[in-house]
Amino acid sequence: MLNISQNNILDKKLEKYSTVKSLINRPYYKVLNRIIIVTSFIVLIFLFLPWTQNIAGSGSVTTLKPNQRPQTIQTVISGRIEKWYVKEGDYVRKGDTILFISEIKEDYFDPNLVGNTKNQVEAKKKSVESYGSKVTSLANQIEAIENERKLKLEQADNKIKQAVLKIKTDSIDLEAVKTQLKIARTQFNRSTQLNKEGLKPVTDVEEKRLKLQDAEAKIISQENKYLTSKNEYINARVEIGRIRAEYNEKRSKAESDQFTALSNQYDTEAQVNKLQNQFVNYSIRNGMYYIKAPQTGYVNRALQAGLGENIKEGTPIVSIMPANYEIGVETFVDPIDLPLIHKGERIRVWFDGWPTIVFSGWPDMSYGTFGGKIVAIENFISENGKFRVLIAPDKDDIPWPKQLSIGAGARSIALLNNVPVWFEIWRTLNGFPPNYYTPTSKESKDTKEKK
């Protein structure tokens, strides 16, 4: 603004005007100033108060162990509903009968199926014993054949030795006869010569001729004996080969029969094992007609109804809630907040149906909330686009209500860093995530203190 006028506005005081004086002297103006000043001071202090950063989640009440959650009981075999032993809401113990079903498959209609199968098993076992006895007998037979073969071979060896000795004897006798023949021929020639000279009579020549003929006859006979001995030796050698072939054939036949018996024995043992397997399966199947409670609990709902209705194997029949369970809470957090959640962290939980006053930044001032600890964090995103976190009761905090039922709604607040209120307002207005931090374990703290 241009300062064109000669009058200086700054030199003039407003107190000289009566209207301004009247406004200044009014009492409520001073009170308003004080209220503004006090309020500003309180807001300033409030901005510097500590605020606990947190991550909110929602879920439901569940159990910590999978075997303690509501489950359905299925039938292992197909059958027809014949009789119900429970109704909805009943308390059942482990092993109590819930339902009885009858058989609908024609392969199991025989009421004496288990007994007949057992008889077949016993019969096959006796067959196995028979084959075992046969194998033992054949083994003894093979041993006897082997012993007889050894004796026969020894006997044949003795015959060969005898034939060899006889050949030697006959050859010696043959040489002796040859010598006698030579002597007889020499004597005959000499007698003939002396007879021509008139020194020997004719009778002496005839005598020497007879001796020569006798010697020639003996040598022929001895040669026959010698050839006969050789033939006996050859026959003895052939006999050894025949004995070996004969007893090898007998042994091979006995071993073949033994192997056949062993094969039949093993095959029968396999049949026994198969029949025993069938016998056990049939026995177990007979016990499956009575569907029993797998654990102690309450029958929630009958999923099948009526009598005479056919059900297939694996069909759910009833749902049961275990009587004893450890309660917990499953909550779901956004993927952006998952890196801020760690196993073992403390968390605040409140349940539907319990009066609650929650100050998310001041957990100590919240009413109706209960303490918990994170025991598991799911690594795969759920169908709702969030990650599942399992919370267990904090033993150092107030016990959770005993009246909680499985499936009831629950909400949670995971506590993070402590920051001033002004920082949290600034972070929220700017849309920044909570500060990321990694909790230090007790072990690392202890090691640092020792160092």
Image: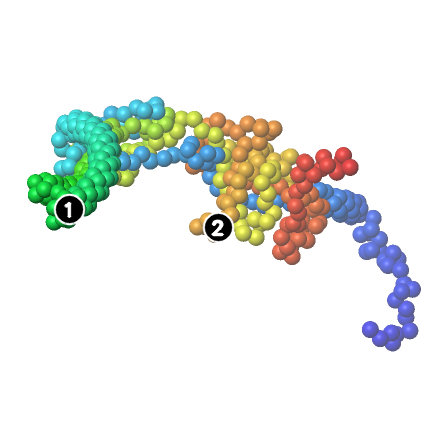
Residue 194 - label: 1
Which residue appears at 59% of the width and 38% of the height? Answer: 344
- Left or right of 151? Residue 351 is right
Which residue appears at 17% of the width and 46% of the height? Answer: 190
Name the residue type under label 1: Leu
Q: Residues within 10 Å of mark 2 (few under 14, many from 20)?
A: some
Name the residue type under label 2: Ile
Disc 1 or disc 2, which is closer to the eye? 1
- Is residue 352 among the parts visible in the rendering? no
Quadrant in the picture for the N terminus: bottom right
Q: Name the spot of residue 56 as percent of width and height, x first.
A: 56, 45
Q: Residues within 10 Å of mark 1 (few under 14, many from 20)?
A: some
- Is residue 30 among the parts visible in the rendering? yes
Q: Which residue is mark 2?
A: 381
Q: Name the spot of residue 437 as percent of width and height, x first.
A: 66, 47
Which residue appears at 65% of the width and 45% of the height? Answer: 438
Secondary element at tag 2: loop
Q: Is residue 189 above or below residue 273?
A: below
- Front-most of residues 316 and 10: 316
